[in-house]
Structures are given as structure tokens and as C-alpha cells.
Image: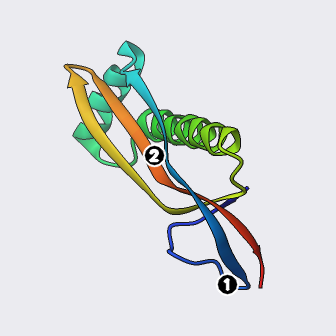
Amino acid sequence: MIITNTETIAGYHVTEIRGLVQGNTVRAKHAGRDIAASFKNLVGGELKGYTELLTESRRQAVERMMAQAEQLGANAILNVRFTTSAVTAGAAELYAYGTAVVVQPA
């Protein structure tokens, strides 16, 4: 599965458009991470617990998007985008979406 945030893939041409595909996950903060983050806010620096949480969330959202594209018979996803939104206090959604297509080498 080729995944890109561009409209085209060099060396390939789109033969079919299968439609919009998406994947999402909703994650809640972890109390231990919140405590560590509040200490980090005092001295500055990367909030590694949250970085790991977002990395895992992105991976899971992309996997779900890819599974949906595979069900549609696509072998690539173009124009992939990510967005986040607050669902409730302490929880956020990470959403990935793009256009499932069938591509062939040019």
C-alpha cells in the first residue's frame, strides 16, 4: 500500500478512484503522564509521554485507514491528512483520511 500526502505518485498513474477512506482513534490521557508533564512544564522540554501517545495514535489511525482501503481493493491512498479534536476533557481523537485509489506503474 502506497500512502502519500500528495495528489500524484511519481512513476504511477491512477486507474481507479475507490473513494474516501478514514481511520481514527480516541485516546485519553494517563494520570502518570499528566504528572510528568506538569513537572516538565516547570523546566521545559519535550513531553515524551504525550509524544509516544500521539505516535501510537497516528499509527493506529493509519492502520485503520489502510484496512478500509484494502477492503475497497485499493493499492494506494492519496492526499492523506491528519486532524485532531478534543472529544471530552482529557480525551482527544486523531483522525486520518485520504482518497483510496488503484495505481499502476506508468
Coordinates of residue 81 in the picture (x, y in percent): 42, 57
Q: Quick one: 74 or 15, which is closer to the camera?
A: 15
Q: Residue at x 23, y 31 (%)?
A: 86
Q: Residue at x 45, y 49 (%)?
A: 97
Please, is residue 100 above or below residue 37 in the view? below
Q: Residue at x 19, y 19 (%)?
A: 89
Per the rendering, the mark at residue 96 is: 2
As helix, strand or loop, the secondary structure at mark 2 comes to strand
Q: Which residue is mark 1?
A: 10
Q: Looking at numbered disc 2 in the image, what kind of residue is underneath it?
A: Ala
Q: Looking at numbered disc 1 in the image, what kind of residue is underneath it?
A: Ala
Coordinates of residue 101 in the picture (x, y in percent): 62, 60
Q: Quick one: 102 or 49, which is closer to the camera?
A: 102
As helix, strand or loop, the secondary structure at mark 1 comes to loop
Coordinates of residue 70 in the picture (x, y in percent): 70, 43
> How many other residues sit within 10 Å of disc 2, few (<14), some (14-19) or many (≥20)?
many
Residue 84, quarter of the rendered image:
top left
* Horizontal arrangement in the rendering, residue 32 relative to residue 88 (left or right): right
Please, is residue 74 above or below residue 104 in the view? above
Q: Quadrant of the N terminus?
A: bottom right
Q: Quick one: 57 or 40, which is closer to the camera?
A: 57
Count of numbered circles on the image: 2
Q: Quick one: 14 or 38, which is closer to the camera?
A: 14
Q: Quadrant of the C terminus?
A: bottom right
